[in-house]
Image: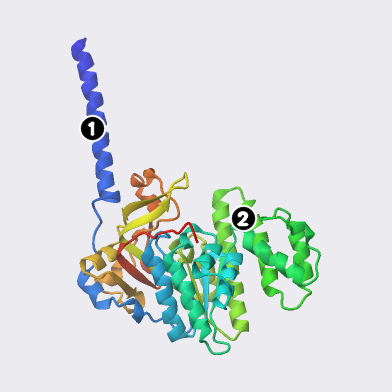
């Protein structure tokens, strides 16, 4: 009997050991120590260029920059570097962010001489990820540019998201008061539940002059309410991208009315990418604009990323993308480089590699220890050249620092 018990115990221990070994191997291969295969390093070195050398087709109307993560300094710094390039070379005068419309309008007022500081303006956007030195630097650069800009050549700051209603609601209240409208029902509110009330005020504002921003603020409140009331999570994801694509189109129309034909937008890779199946904002914009939509994706070889836990506390965690392009850039000694897929011959090894399905970094705004055991949760398996027209590769990405006091 004792021998039988020992045999059972040993079998249980053996099974547990095998499970642990399998889990360890999975972690080593997908999550921690093995960083995947490398693309052709010599070919990548031949085609890689600096960010300052970025060029986009002249027919591009909306130029998008993606973020592989929201929690790294480099991807925020790239917003400013790429925007400066487009302002100088392509006549772009508008910056649109994956941030709420009302909060971004507060930034727009600041860069046109408004009161406060760049940090306070960044905080108005609402999202924690924008309360950083990098975002404040971008905003301050736009303010200084506008201080010296010729008439009609000033820069504008927009937001195309709708998840935080507070500032859009303030814009609506402000416009109602300026136009002598009764908006007592809005007083004391920080969010809105009454779609009929917003529709009524919107209709009244549409009869007034110079109220397009207030009317759009009303639309953002309606968008946010529609999104909030969508209980199916997958449907909500689809709806948000659809609404953001519509908002980008509205912003482009505002710029065209000012005589500017181009717009720079920035958001997570998952939103700006030209997916083959998922109806993301980028795919919808490509369907509408065709070659007029140009996307620069980003990725990392290694990231130490600032991410929130379910409790709200933020943590800094290390991940590897498994991206062969990013690994080749790392092995080539390139800290940051730009790869234009149109310049890589399709019959070359690198040309094949950029068109093959591969793992790419895809960290959102959230962290769970389970991500260590489920690598697909922080990666996407797609051909880079299908998602993007070009990519910026970052070898080692450092975490953002969020300022809680402004």
Instruction: Write the residue at 39% across / 60% down.
Output: 400
Residue 216 figure quarter: bottom right
* Dots 2, 1 in contact, CB < 8 A: no
Instruction: Write the residue at 60% across / 70% down.
Output: 105
Q: Which mark is residue 17?
A: 1
Residue most extreme to the top:
1
Q: Which mark is residue 283?
A: none
Q: Where in the figure is residue 345, as x and y percent of width and height?
A: 29, 77
Mark 2 vs 1, N-terminal side: 1
Q: Which residue is mark 2?
A: 227
Residue most extreme to the left:
3
Position of 52 relative to 244 (above/below): below
Residue 300 figure quarter: bottom left
Q: Residues within 10 Å of mark 1 (few under 14, many from 20)?
A: few
Position of 163 relative to 76 (above/below): above
Left or right for 255, reference 302: right
Q: In front: 226, or 97?
A: 97
User: Can residue 120 be seen by looking at this rendering?
Assistant: yes
């Amino acid at each position: 009997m004792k021998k039988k018990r020992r045999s059972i115990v040993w079998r249980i221990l053996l099974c547990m050991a095998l499970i642990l070994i399998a889990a360890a191997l999975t972690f080593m291969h997908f999550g921690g120590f093995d960083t995947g295969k490398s693309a052709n390093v010599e070919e990548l070195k031949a085609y890689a260029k600096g960010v300052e050398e970025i060029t986009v087709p002249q027919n591009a109307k909306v130029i998008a920059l993606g973020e592989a993560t929201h929690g790294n300094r480099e991807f925020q710094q790239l917003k400013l570097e790429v925007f400066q390039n487009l302002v100088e070379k392509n006549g772009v005068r508008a910056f649109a962010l994956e941030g709420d419309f009302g909060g971004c309008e507060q930034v727009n007022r600041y860069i046109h001489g408004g009161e406060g500081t760049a940090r306070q303006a960044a905080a108005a956007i609402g999202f924690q990820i924008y309360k950083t030195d990098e975002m404040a630097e971008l905003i301050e650069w736009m303010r200084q540019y506008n201080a010296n800009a010729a008439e009609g050549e000033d820069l504008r700051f927009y937001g195309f998201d709708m998840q935080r209603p507070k500032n859009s609601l303030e814009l609506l209240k402000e416009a109602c008061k300026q136009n002598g409208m009764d908006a007592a029902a809005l007083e004391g509110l920080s969010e809105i539940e009454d779609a009929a009330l917003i529709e009524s005020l919107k209709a009244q504002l549409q009869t007034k002059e110079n109220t397009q921003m207030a009317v759009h603020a009303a639309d953002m409140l309606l968008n946010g309410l529609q999104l909030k009331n969508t209980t199916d999570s997958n449907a909500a994801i689809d709806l948000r991208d659809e609404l953001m694509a519509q908002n980008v189109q509205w912003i482009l129309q505002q710029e065209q009315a000012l005589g500017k034909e181009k717009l720079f937008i920035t958001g997570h890779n998952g939103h700006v990418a030209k997916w083959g199946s998922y109806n993301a904002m980028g795919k919808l914009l490509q369907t509408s604009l065709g070659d007029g939509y140009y996307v620069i994706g980003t990725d990392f070889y290694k990231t130490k990323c600032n991410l929130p836990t379910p409790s709200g506390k933020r943590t800094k965690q290390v991940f590897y993308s498994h991206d062969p392009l990013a690994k080749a850039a790392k092995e080539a000694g390139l800290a940051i480089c730009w790869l234009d897929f149109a310049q890589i011959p399709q019959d070359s090894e690198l040309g094949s590699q950029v068109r093959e399905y591969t793992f790419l970094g895809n960290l959102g705004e959230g962290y769970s220890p389970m991500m260590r055991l489920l690598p697909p949760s922080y990666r996407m398996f797609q051909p880079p050249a299908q998602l993007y027209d070009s990519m910026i590769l970052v070898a080692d990405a450092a975490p953002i620092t969020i300022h809680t006091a402004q």
